[in-house]
Amino acid sequence: MSLIDTAWSPDLFASLTDIWKQQLSAHLRSVQANDEKVLNWSEPAEAAKLAAELMARGRSTSSIEDCFESLIRQALSAGQNLQHPRYIGHQVPANIPLAALFDAAGSVTNQVMAIYEMGPWATAVECAIVQALTDKIGWQSDTAGGLLTSGGSLANLTALLTARNVCLADSWETGVPSDVVLVAHPDTHYSIARSAGILGLGTQQVVRAAITNDRHIDPQQLSNQLRSLREANKTVTAVVACACATPIGAFDDLNAVADVCENQDVWLHVDAAHGASALMSRQHRHKLTGIERADSVVWDAHKMLFVPALCAALLYKNRAHRFETFRQDAPYLFDPSNPGLADYDSGISTIECTKRAMGFGLWGIWSLFGEELFEQMVDRTFERGHQLWQKLNDADDFEPLHEPECNIVAFRYLPPHIANASEEIQDRFQFDLRTRLIQSGDFYIVQAKLNGRSVLRACVMNPLTTEADLQELLNTLRRHAIDMMA
Amino acid sequence: MSLIDTAWSPDLFASLTDIWKQQLSAHLRSVQANDEKVLNWSEPAEAAKLAAELMARGRSTSSIEDCFESLIRQALSAGQNLQHPRYIGHQVPANIPLAALFDAAGSVTNQVMAIYEMGPWATAVECAIVQALTDKIGWQSDTAGGLLTSGGSLANLTALLTARNVCLADSWETGVPSDVVLVAHPDTHYSIARSAGILGLGTQQVVRAAITNDRHIDPQQLSNQLRSLREANKTVTAVVACACATPIGAFDDLNAVADVCENQDVWLHVDAAHGASALMSRQHRHKLTGIERADSVVWDAHKMLFVPALCAALLYKNRAHRFETFRQDAPYLFDPSNPGLADYDSGISTIECTKRAMGFGLWGIWSLFGEELFEQMVDRTFERGHQLWQKLNDADDFEPLHEPECNIVAFRYLPPHIANASEEIQDRFQFDLRTRLIQSGDFYIVQAKLNGRSVLRACVMNPLTTEADLQELLNTLRRHAIDMMA
């Protein structure tokens, strides 16, 4: 049998899938049971060297089954275990494992999009998802629209490109004049400022929206800022609000921000990558009241809808705006004699040409479990956020920095010998403590800066995280702090 | 058991994987055996409606196993079958099915990148791949570098952003002046012109490089063009050459183009998304001679390295250029106190923040089979391209439009009643014939425009495509043409 025949053999595929199944299900069991470290830390240069050696070595004398097994084992033993209940870190979830089976059905068969005929079912699934998500926002399915793209950063970039082109019709063909600005919540994800750099505005043209002490856009001040910019002959391509912002999970008052934007006729973009999923929850959807007044919304299904990365939705109130992003023919791809297909040719509205069938995971899980699962996941993880805050609040040696609006909680650990130290020592302590914690593999949490100070930050991204795990986080931090003094 | 516990159950995961394995392996068998249509065409609005109904309906009374099985069956029965030996269409492959198992190990566990600690093994794998690919180009691993990103379009955009920032140091912060141009092969992928629109140059600022009759950049004329642009005070951010270009698969003479670019000190970007994989072949690598002189190269592993979409590499001759793409702090992510990690924090050099472990498929296959498999796949599919051209050439009623340089072949079918008709009728005939062919499910090929005329285009993206399949393509086109007259 030639290498090619072996590589494409359905029988070999089936037998290796058996091995894969054993390994993955065993891995999930042991990680869920806290029998593994959260993060398998290794020095980056060493890990890279090992990966290269495995490629260079080939399987030599071992059987293909044995080699496959050892490669999968390596991949599972050397990563970050997001499926661990004590992964409480960045806003990437312990995804629903089953979602990956739907996703992988698309990968085995390489179902992709760009033009409709290359991925009829991938396209159908994307249309259904866009409709379901825009419904949740409260938009009409015959006027709203959207797309899936490879991550929230790309979705933000695409939205701001659309806003730029709508605001400055000639910019696509002739470039961007100076004196064009973007007004954004200062806590927006870094992809917003990057977008200004990419899109030819320049990062200096990002104006920081004034915020309140609790880190929400101040609508009255925003109104004044927009008026001043207009008086200075600046063109504002968009206002970017957050639902929620990353540092402490603050949801802007979208109705108040929308009032200002409508009043001054400025595009409102809401980065709801993390928080839009609260729309699935009867208990929490009020946090997004007013989102239906945005011109564009980013909603990452690979965050709080718990599907594997990447599956980001960019949604437009006015579906026609999808065609403002690029203004270009690609005759060998898009069929001008079939204009009706433009609605289904994904490449017309996304930066990707070939695009994965990235909706399969969400579509499959939604179809298998219904909406109720998503509501439970949101409610559970938001509740855990509140429980963590309560525990921090009850403890004398921890300082919670805000009452959480969702599953994001920023705090500091200030044991007596640190509580009275200088700011510099306190900051360094948070940093060192966290480094020690994550390299131990006991928990994974995040470091952040808040008002210039170093803080710890936890985000409950696994519905299997229990209240006991959260209590244990406090205990474990205390233990590591003691060990640090030794 | 709560919905959450069910959704995360390792036991359910294992039992559904058994169903998945049966379905996928049976699907591969029947598609490889030509027991299925190539394209399962359906009207887009109807397909979208069905996908939405399945989401809305939920599984009602059926068991979770039965519902899962029917959802997977739907996804496999309604797509484009790239695994079919008679898929000879767009430059997206019948991927090695086993690659998807490695990929899915990453999806089940949601291994991602952005910062090193979020995906230590994903990062290690990416480093190993970048090193292996830059080695193939002929670069030194201690000076070259690169990244993986979500598709060739995004890779081209990122490369041209880097080139823009290197050429115009202030453009990141203050925007792009007018009189900045990009010089590109007129057959470059549409993402190149789009990049000019996105990056604030403007699509009108794309200057078409002069090409020869056989669609290669004319180096002498290119030199004159660059000189004229300089004399007109235009800043040229980059020259974009192709290896190969999409329409007929023409590989530019990279040494000759590099001579011009070096001479005039202009960034050379080579879009080798499709053709770089010829570097794996002793027989064909000469087509890329000179690629080592490019400043940036795009190489899609999800094209001719036959892994599932998306896995695009952007490679830099000078690894320091990775840090020119964005010039921005994101303190809560990137750790300024650990500057050594910047080499391993993927988000510093990619538009994606959270990024899939998209290298797992390529890394796994390379480790399992060694480089030889890639050589065989390239040689086989390029050979098939030549065989198809030979058959077209031997037939009186077909007109091949070029001798193929790889696996891409453009041609027209001109039976007697069409050969003497007007150009308009001839063009319409190619279009109608191809529509009929693909909707029949017998074969999948592509339409294109060449010198303003409609043509047919085949690209052999499946090593299982036989010479007999190619002969049958001619016969099938003849049969459909006869049926069209009925």
Image (cartoon, coloured by chain):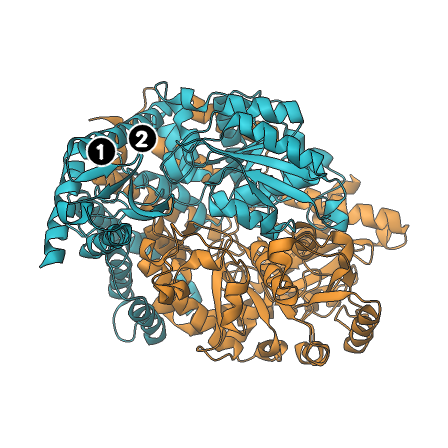
Chain colours: A orange, B cyan
- Image coords of residue A103 (percent x, y): 38, 54
Against B370, residue A331 (above or below) is below
Q: Chain of mark 1?
A: B
* Quadrant in which residue A207 is drawn: bottom right
Q: Residue at x 64, y 42 (%)?
A: B181
**Spot occupied by residue B200 in the image (x, y as percentages of width and height):** 65, 51
Q: Secondary structure at mark 1?
A: helix
Does the residue at mark 1 contact the one at mark 2 (Cβ under 8 Å)? yes
Give residue B437's position: percent from left, percent from top: 20, 52
List the residue tagged with mark 2: B404
Check the image and report above or below for A310 versus A381.
above
Could you classify mark 1 by the number of other residues whose Cα lies within 10 Å: few (under 14), some (14-19), or many (20 or more)?
A: many
Q: Tell which of A23 and A202 is nearer to you.
A: A202
Residue A170 makes an appearance in the image: yes
In the visual, does A483 lie left or right of A110? right
Whether residue A308 sits left or right of residue A415 in the image: it is: left
| Amino acid at the residue labelled 1 | Leu
Q: Quadrant of the N terminus of chain A?
A: top left
Alpha carbon of mark 1 to alpha carbon of mark 2: how far?
9 Å
Chain for disc number 2: B
Q: Which residue is at the front of the view, B483 or B128?
A: B483
- Residue beneath label 1, please? B388
Q: How many marks?
A: 2
Labels 1 and 2 share a subunit: yes
